[in-house]
Image (cartoon, rainbow, N blue to C red):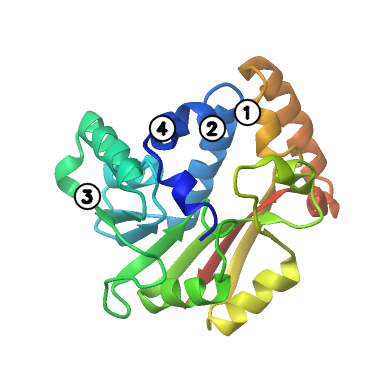
């Protein structure tokens, strides 16, 4: 994985949510959570694995809604942030955080109903093998996001600490086929890249978001989007 040492640093974990999901970043957080909830549907007693769970913002949210969920991440510091978040939300006893490698998931085949991987594939050095492993442990659904090639994301990609892997539609279709997964839905979003939203205040971000959504509502303009959400089934 790209930037493992940077990602696992204690100071990065402590500041992760504040840097990414404050100011205009709140719009990103809201939209990503909406995408996950919409894709997974009813959660009561659903067995879910979140790979690269980070500070647990999705893990805790899904636990609050009744999912039987495991959050896995390579960073001990990130997991500790997640545990604190779960404790504050009162769901510490209804979820599990564990440290592990997405390339070698410690679960049997078909163990989970849904596997979620958000903010993961832009760091993956071998996306084919990672997706195959996610598919192995799921008996139904694999949901993940990617950043799009030929989008505004590429404008500031060079400035990120470890860079990002960007994907075309062809590349994702090919990955899904090789993993024996069938795409049932894809949504494209955010013409203006995430980094732009994080730099501006809430009220300004809301105005740009309005322009953003209007552009993407025009048929054919989803090619301008910088992020995609992929819902695939076994």
For marks 4 and 1, give the CA distance.
19 Å
Q: Secondary structure at mark 3?
A: strand
Q: Do residues under tags 3 and 1 come within 8 Å of each other at their CB atoms?
A: no
In which quarter of the view is residue 114 placed? Answer: bottom left
Lower position in the chain sequence, tag 4 or tag 2:
4
For marks 2 and 3, give the CA distance.
24 Å
Disc 4 versus disc 2: nearer the observer = 4
Residue visible at 31% across and 61% down in the picture: 100
Residue visible at 36% across and 64% down in the picture: 101
Residue visible at 53% across and 48% down in the picture: 35
- Tell me residue 91's x, y (percent): 20, 39
Disc 2 versus disc 3: nearer the observer = 2
Lower position in the chain sequence, tag 3 or tag 4:
4
Q: Say which mark, if any, is on residue 11.
A: 4
For marks 2 and 1, give the CA distance.
6 Å
Q: Which residue is mark 2?
A: 20
Mark 3 surroundings: few (<14), some (14-19) or many (≥20) residues within 10 A: many
- Tell me residue 53's x, y (percent): 39, 50
Q: Which residue is mark 3?
A: 95
For marks 3 and 4, give the CA distance.
25 Å
Q: Which residue is mark 1?
A: 198
For marks 4 and 2, give the CA distance.
14 Å
Q: Do residues under tags 2 and 1 come within 8 Å of each other at their CB atoms?
A: yes
In the image, taking residue 157 as reference, residue 4 lies left or right, namely left
Of the pair 96 and 154, the residue shown nearer to us: 154
Residue 10's place in the image compared with 198, above or below, is: below
- Tell me residue 190's x, y (percent): 70, 42
For marks 3 and 1, give the CA distance.
30 Å
């Amino acid at each position: 994985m790209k930037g493992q040492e940077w990602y696992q640093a204690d100071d990065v974990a402590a500041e992760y949510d504040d840097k990414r999901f404050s100011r205009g970043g709140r719009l990103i957080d809201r939209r990503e959570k909406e995408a996950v909830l919409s894709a997974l549907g009813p959660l009561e007693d659903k067995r879910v694995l979140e790979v690269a769970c980070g500070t647990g913002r999705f893990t805790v949210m899904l636990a609050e809604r009744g999912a039987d969920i495991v959050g896995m991440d390579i960073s001990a510091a990130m997991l500790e942030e997640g545990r604190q978040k779960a404790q504050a939300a009162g769901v510490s006893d209804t979820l599990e955080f564990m440290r592990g490698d997405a390339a070698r998931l410690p679960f049997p085949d078909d163990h989970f109903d849904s596997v979620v991987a958000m903010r993961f594939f832009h760091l993956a050095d071998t996306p084919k093998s990672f997706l195959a492993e996610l598919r192995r442990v799921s008996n139904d659904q694999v949901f993940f996001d990617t950043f799009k090639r030929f989008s505004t994301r590429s404008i500031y990609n060079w400035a990120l600490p470890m860079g990002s892997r960007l994907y075309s539609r062809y590349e994702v279709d090919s990955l899904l086929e090789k993993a024996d997964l069938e795409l049932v839905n894809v949504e494209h979003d955010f013409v203006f890249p995430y980094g732009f939203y994080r730099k501006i205040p809430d009220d300004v971000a809301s105005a740009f978001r309005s322009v953003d959504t209007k552009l993407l509502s025009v048929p054919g303009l989803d090619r301008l989007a910088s992020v995609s959400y992929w819902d695939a089934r076994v």
